[in-house]
């Protein structure tokens, strides 16, 4: 039962979904943080979800059936570089499209850019360390909410921050319970995602 629960948490909060959740946080939890028109938010969120979740997911499915990767769990360190690189390409294309074509909001572009750079860093780290992609993504989400809480402080934002921290803890615990990572890999992933994104958001929003 616990193993199924841990697996479910890992699937629901998989790394490919976190960028969409971060953008949803900007649009609907802290709407005053962006200048994106309300009428355009849903279509932009769908576009981002399509390009950062659905398309990369289909790419990984194609790699699985082409025997390029042994499975979706990517348990081996060497199994991670090619799929991570593929996803990084999709993310770079998305960030570039929003920067050069749409450019509707600076904070939105910053979010897509920091997510992309975090993924590139994660891919490079894979050469010598099997760091947790789940926790790297969760660290970025926690960093975003933490800085937003400092900029737009309110009681609901404080509780939302606690909720995201709790979710991050559940995800990390699930990865450990499933023996997908060692503790150092989970902590290292979270710290890399958090520190990289926190510095970017702090400089942009509070300096």
Image: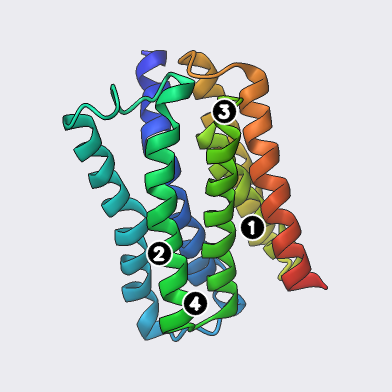
Q: Which residue is mark 4?
A: 99
| Of labels 4 and 1, the one closer to you | 4
Farthest right residue in view: 207
Q: CA distance from mark 2 to mark 1?
A: 22 Å
Q: CA distance from mark 2 to mark 3?
A: 29 Å
Q: Tag 2, which secondary structure?
A: helix
Q: Residues within 10 Å of mark 1 (few under 14, many from 20)?
A: many
Q: Tag 4, which secondary structure?
A: helix
Figure check: 184 above or below 159: above
Q: Which residue is mark 2?
A: 93
Q: Which mark is residue 174?
A: none
112 left or right, relative to 153? left
Look at 60% across and 32% down and name the residue there: 169
Look at 62% across and 34% down and name the residue there: 189
Residue 206: quarter of image: bottom right
Q: Work out whether residue 6 or residue 126 is closer to the camera in this orientation and state it.
A: 126
Counting from the top left corner in percent of width and height, residue 18 is at 46, 49
Q: Work out whether residue 32 or residue 65 is closer to the camera in this orientation and state it.
A: 65
| Of labels 2 and 1, the one closer to you | 2
Q: Which mark is residue 144?
A: 1
Q: Earlier in the sequence, mark 4 or mark 1?
A: 4
Q: CA distance from mark 3 to mark 1?
A: 18 Å
Residue 34: quarter of image: bottom right
Check whether the beta carbons of the residues at disc 2 and disc 1 lie within 8 A of each other: no
Q: Residues within 10 Å of mark 2 (few under 14, many from 20)?
A: some
Check whether the beta carbons of the residues at disc 2 and disc 3 lie within 8 A of each other: no
Q: Which residue is mark 3?
A: 172
Q: Tag 3, which secondary structure?
A: helix
108 left or right, relative to 162? left
Q: CA distance from mark 4 to mark 1?
A: 19 Å
């Amino acid at each position: 039962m616990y193993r199924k629960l841990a697996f479910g948490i890992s699937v629901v909060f998989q790394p490919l979904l976190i960028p969409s959740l971060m953008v949803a946080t900007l649009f609907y939890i802290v709407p005053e943080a962006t200048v994106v028109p309300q009428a355009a938010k849903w279509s932009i969120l769908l576009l981002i979800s399509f390009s950062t979740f659905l398309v990369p997911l289909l790419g990984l499915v194609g790699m699985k059936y082409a025997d390029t990767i042994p499975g979706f769990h990517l348990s081996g360190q060497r199994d991670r570089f090619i799929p991570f690189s593929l996803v990084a390409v999709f993310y770079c294309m998305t960030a570039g499209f929003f920067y050069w074509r749409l450019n509707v909001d600076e904070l939105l572009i910053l979010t897509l850019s920091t997510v992309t750079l975090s993924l590139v860093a994660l891919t490079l780290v894979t050469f010598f360390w099997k760091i947790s992609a789940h926790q790297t993504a969760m660290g970025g989400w926690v960093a975003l909410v933490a800085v937003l809480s400092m900029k737009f402080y309110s009681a609901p934002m404080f509780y939302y921050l606690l909720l995201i921290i709790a979710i991050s803890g559940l995800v990390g615990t699930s990865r450990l319970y499933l023996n997908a990572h060692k503790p150092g890999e989970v902590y290292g992933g979270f710290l890399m995602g958090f520190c990289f994104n926190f510095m970017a958001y702090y400089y942009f929003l509070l300096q």
